[in-house]
């Protein structure tokens, strides 16, 4: 199979970790008989520097023409430390999500047996954790209008807006994945306070009639934040709105012991996008110490979700698991002197797949 892939390395450690994922993809292509047609585009701070736009039109055209997108990271301290900056790298990410119609972010959270000791939670709390977070990605307070500041600069305001159709399409995914898994769906909201959350809850109650085999529970976001730490094995599929999902999925990432282990998929109307969840980590950029595993596992999700190539995704996951088991890991995952570079980890995982 010939696969047309758009590559967006982005900022910080993005180019380094993307390079390792491409090694692994080439190994998969060699083993399973696939070829790749790559195109490379600018996004984030790199695009601002070159084009003055965090998501240039040529990058968007390239993404629209691709079969799938592999994305590194966005973010740069130059903009983080300037609250008055008119153009920011993160604006490119939001624009990309909106223009590509990427309304659903899917983040699997599962523990690796060889790394359970790395979690800040006790082992008995996290053994067997395996759940899916589905976050609505193009609505809510990040995109709501009006948004801005008063003329005197003394007041700022954001609007949280959802319509029923936006809720239905994301919750449909939640029901579908719950049906395939353990048939348990947790809807996270703040319906005791927010009108948008009450619309979410009302819409899910209407939909649940069509999914009688799926057990639906409703959980306020503050309670969900506690339960993720106290009883993480309880969850199967979580579906929630944009800002709540942004916060809860980063909280859930610590269960595995490192942000560098978790991939994600953003799917929707046009081309699907696959990316690690950890951000640009500018402190590590260029040092060859960043953990490439989340990006490599994002490539596994790309094969599975974009092309239905389950065997290819499984091969990557097995190679990653062996790397972790053998201790071929970057410095974020070990307290010992023996660590491996970003390049060495990528090389090892690719070699396992070749073998």
Image (cartoon, rainbow, N blue to C red):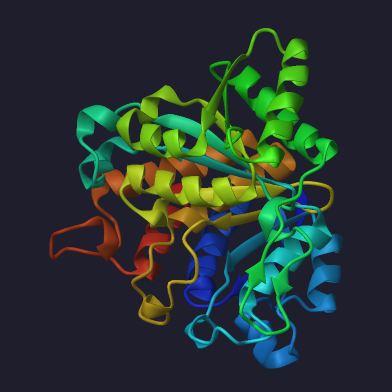
User: Is residue 66 among what the camera can see?
Assistant: no
- Answer above or below: position of 197 versus 56: above
Residue 298 vs residue 167: left or right? left
Q: Quadrant of residue 339?
A: bottom left
Q: How far across and down, in percent of the image, does residue 1 sit?
A: 76, 47
Q: Is residue 204 left or right of residue 131?
A: right
Which residue in the rendered view is the most extreme toward the top? 212
Q: Nearest the camera: 84 or 351?
A: 84
Image x and y of residue 248, in percent: 48, 45
Question: Would you say 228 lies left or right of 241 here?
Answer: left
Left/right of residue 319 with respect to residue 178 in the rendered view: left
Give the residue at x 46% y 60%. 278
**312 in relation to 96, above or below:** above
* Residue 219 seen anywhere in this rendered image of the structure: yes
Instruction: Say which residue appears at 25% left-offset and 39% top-offset.
Output: 116
Q: Is residue 156 above or below residue 120?
A: below
Residue 209, image x, y percentages: 76, 11
Picture quadrant where residue 164 is located: top right
Instruction: In the rendered view, tell whether residue 101 sits above or below residue 51.
Output: above
Q: Residue at 20% x, 42% y: name it.
A: 117
Q: Nearer the viewer, residue 169 or 202?
A: 202
Q: Percent x, y for residue 106?
A: 61, 42
Q: Residue at x 41, y 82 (%)?
A: 286
């Amino acid at each position: 199979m010939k696969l047309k892939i758009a590559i967006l390395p982005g900022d910080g450690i993005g180019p380094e970790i993307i390079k390792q994922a491409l090694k692994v993809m080439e190994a998969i292509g060699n083993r399973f008989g696939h070829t790749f047609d790559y195109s490379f585009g600018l996004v984030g701070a790199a695009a601002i520097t070159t084009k003055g736009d965090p998501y240039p039109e040529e990058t968007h055209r390239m993404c629209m023409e691709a079969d799938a997108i592999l994305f590194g990271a966005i973010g740069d301290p130059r903009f983080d430390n300037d609250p008055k900056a008119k153009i920011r790298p993160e604006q490119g990410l939001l624009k990309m999500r909106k223009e590509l119609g990427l309304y659903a972010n899917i983040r699997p959270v599962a523990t690796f047996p060889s790394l359970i000791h790395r979690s800040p939670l006790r082992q008995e709390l996290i053994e067997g954790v395996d759940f899916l977070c589905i976050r609505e990605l193009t609505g809510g307070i990040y995109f709501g209008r009006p948004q801005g500041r008063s003329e005197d600069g003394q007041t700022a305001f954001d609007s949280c807006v959802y319509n029923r159709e936006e809720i239905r399409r994301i919750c449909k995914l939640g029901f579908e994945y719950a049906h395939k898994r353990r048939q348990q769906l947790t809807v996270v909201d703040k319906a005791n306070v927010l009108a948008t959350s009450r619309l979410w809850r009302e819409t899910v109650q209407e939909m649940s009639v069509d999914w009688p085999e799926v057990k639906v529970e409703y959980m306020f976001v503050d309670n969900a934040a506690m339960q993720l730490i106290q009883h993480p094995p309880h969850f199967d599929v979580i579906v929630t709105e944009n800002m709540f999902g942004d916060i809860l999925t980063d909280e859930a990432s610590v269960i595995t012991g490192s942000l560098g282990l978790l991939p994600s998929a953003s799917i929707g109307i046009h081309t699907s996008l696959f990316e690690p969840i950890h951000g640009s980590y500018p402190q590590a950029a260029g040092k060859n110490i960043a953990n490439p595993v989340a990006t490599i596992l994002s490539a596994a999700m790309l094969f599975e979700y974009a092309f239905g190539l389950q065997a290819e995704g499984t091969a990557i996951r097995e190679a990653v698991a062996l790397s972790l088991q053998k201790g071929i890991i970057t410095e974020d995952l070990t307290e010992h002197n023996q660590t491996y570079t970003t390049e060495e980890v990528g090389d090892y995982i690719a070699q396992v797949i070749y073998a």
